Amino acid sequence: MIHPSIRAHRLVLGLLLVGNTLAFAGVDPVTRTLTALAAVALAVDLKEQLPFVPRIHTRAAIALAALLVLQLLPWPAFVHRILQPGLAPFLPHGLWPLSVAPWATVQAAAALVVAGILALTASRMAATRSGLPALLILLAAIGALLGLLGLATEPGIPGKVLMIRDNTGGGGPYGPFVNHNHFAVAVELTLPACLALFMAATRHLRVPGEGRRGAAITILATGTAMAVSAAALLRSGSRGGALFLAAGAFLTFPLWSRRRRHQPWIWAMAAILVLGAGTAVLAWNRLPELQDRFKQLVALQGAEGNTRLDLWTGTVKLCRRSPVVGCGAGAYRYAINLDKPPTGSLELRHAHNDWLEWTADTGLVGAAILLGTVGGLLWLLAPARVRRIRFEHRYALAA
């Protein structure tokens, strides 16, 4: 029998994921508050059973927390002149935090804390025999529902966003509360869970017995969900989503496969072709539009006469103004006004390059923390190490 607290944290995690993905919780103060309260409840529950965290990621989390505290503490002017030579002339005299927008840094820190709590809760689920498939099924169901809502809203209910909220921002059915790039991220984080369940079911299908029927049903359900989700991603028009999905499939391929004699590659290739054909049929009439968007990849929408390269050049200049500790986590939208390209009244909120924006926000210290985190993840997921793991866990790690 499962412990009641485990059931509770699974329920709260599911509500958080569904609410923030489908109902766009977090776009207004009320839903942000509810999300924070749910995260606090999960944090309290984590005290009973804290999952294992690799040492390199524990150190990275501690270093990032120290950096955020450093950015929020008030410092005298001479410290700003040393650490932020390009920003010091524009900061108030006297004691002032290293962040140019302290409240934005507080919000960014809170968002990172919530994300960390969700990650720890998901890790706690994945560490149990029943929790891992439950987590994969939850993610797969959210991805399938996202795709279905998007495809259903697109032709029939143009005044809604994913059939749930009123489209008051003038965007498409996949935005604008979360724009099509954010929709693509949600699909990219859920579609691999479908693939993990699909691949595990193909292995169970080879085992004689009653389990074959369940495996066949799982293959049909997850295959359909993958085709619908991928088609919705392509129809949303997100160039970054399409690129990331292709790159992710290519880079993680060694984790999905294992060299074995008599492995039925022909059946695997046939299944991939069928899924690809289903995705292409569902997204066929929107592919030319996506192709046209790829031709304008370096253009910055809304910035007359400028491209993303111009914005990235300005972001590099901003990095040089505060090379060590950055301008403050979450403060990019305020600091970039010093170095943004000549875009008139356009308000630039993001760098359209997450790596550059993170470096501008947190400096070389934050960049080192990020590289250490990614490097540790790559080391843990080395194909030679992962291939020795049982296939259910190997597919989940690949996802």
Image: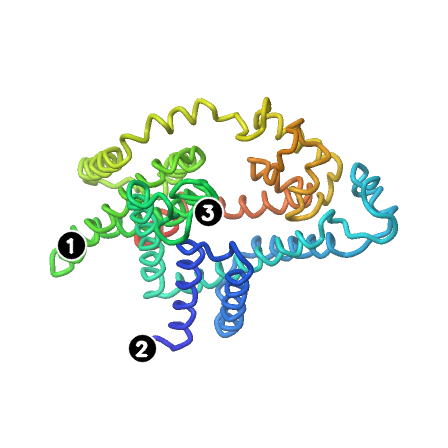
Q: Position of residue 343 (x, y in %)?
A: 64, 28
Q: How is the image coloured?
A: rainbow
- Residue at 40% of width from left, 39% of height from top? 248
Asked which quadrant contains residue 173, the reply is top left
Query: Mark 2 packing: few (<14 Cα in 10 Å), some, or many (20+)?
Result: few
Q: Quadrant of the rendered structure where residue 309 is?
A: top right
In this rendering, the label closer to the viewer, 3 or 2: 3
Q: Which residue is mark 1?
A: 207
Work out how far the residue at label 1 is from the one at label 3, CA to CA, in angstroms.
52 Å
Horizontal and vertical percent position of residue 6: 40, 72
| Along the line of sight, the residue nearer the viewer: 270 or 22 | 22
Q: Are marks 3 and 2 in contact (CB under 8 Å)?
A: no
Which residue is disc 2 drawn over?
1
Q: Check whether the beta carbons of the residues at disc 1 and disc 2 lie within 8 A of each other.
A: no
Which of disc 3 and disc 1 is earlier in sequence?
3
Q: Secondary structure at mark 1?
A: loop
Q: Of marks 1 and 2, which one's residue comes earlier in the chain? A: 2
Residue 168, labelled with which disc?
3
Amino acid under disc 2: Met
Judge left or right: residue 304 versus residue 130.
Answer: right
The Cα–Cα distance between marks 3 and 2, rounded to whole angstroms, is 47 Å
Three-letter amino acid code of the residue under disc 3: Thr
Whether 366 is drawn above or below 117: the answer is above
In the image, taking residue 66 as reference, residue 277 lies left or right, namely left
What crowding class fits label 1: few (fewer than 14 Cα within 10 Å), some (14-19), or many (20 or more)? few
Q: Position of residue 268 (x, y in %)?
A: 22, 39
Q: Say left or right for 123 vs 92.
A: left
Judged from this view, the residue extending furthest toward the left is 209
